[in-house]
Amino acid sequence: MTSQGASLQNCNNQLVACLEELKEQRGGLDQNIEKVLKEKSEIEKQLAQLSKELALVNENLSKKIQARNEFDRTIQETEGAYMKILESSQTLLHVLKRESTNLNKRISDS
């Protein structure tokens, strides 16, 4: 019976050792889980902050694009008006030269 008792004691010791090893592995896994949860939480905070920043950037960009479009419209309207002024100036110059030539002919003919 002593050998059975020794065998039982040996089995019991191995069982206890295996349980302790499993508990240590579980403890290591617990620590790893806590670390990953902290990383997850930090990433979620960063994501929330970046989402806010992105919303602000998009709003700012939208305003700037709208302002640029207004600049484009103003430039286009101004260039169109300037071209009309230029055409009118050229027409006026042509009329003035023609009238000047006619006046000079009248003076010469007199």
Image (tube, rainbow, N blue to C red):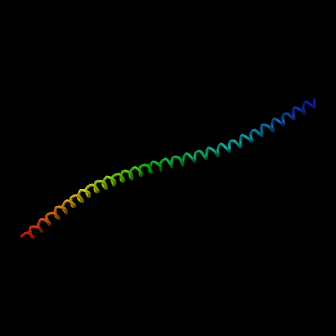
Residue found farthest to the right: 2
**Would you say 25 lies left or right of 77 here?**
right
| Quarter location, residue 8 | top right
Q: Quadrant of the N terminus?
A: top right
> Does residue 11 sit above or below 58 in this rendering?
above
* In the foreground, 103 or 68: 103
> Does residue 3 sit above or below 77 in this rendering?
above
In this figure, what is the number of numbered marks?
0
| Quarter location, residue 7 | top right
Q: Residue at x 45, y 48 (%)?
A: 55
> Does residue 29 sit above or below 80 in this rendering?
above
Residue found farthest to the front: 109
Residue found farthest to the top: 1
* In the foreground, 74 or 54: 74
Q: Position of residue 6 (x, y in %)?
A: 90, 33
Q: Position of residue 49 (x, y in %)?
A: 51, 49
Q: Quadrant of the C terminus?
A: bottom left
Q: Residue at x 53, y 47 (%)?
A: 47
Q: Position of residue 16 (x, y in %)?
A: 81, 37
**Would you say 107 lies left or right of 16 here?**
left
Q: Residue at x 11, y 67 (%)?
A: 105
**Would you say 34 lies left or right of 103 here?**
right
Q: Residue at x 38, y 51 (%)?
A: 65
Q: Position of residue 54 (x, y in %)?
A: 47, 49
**Would you say 31 lies left or right of 78 here?**
right
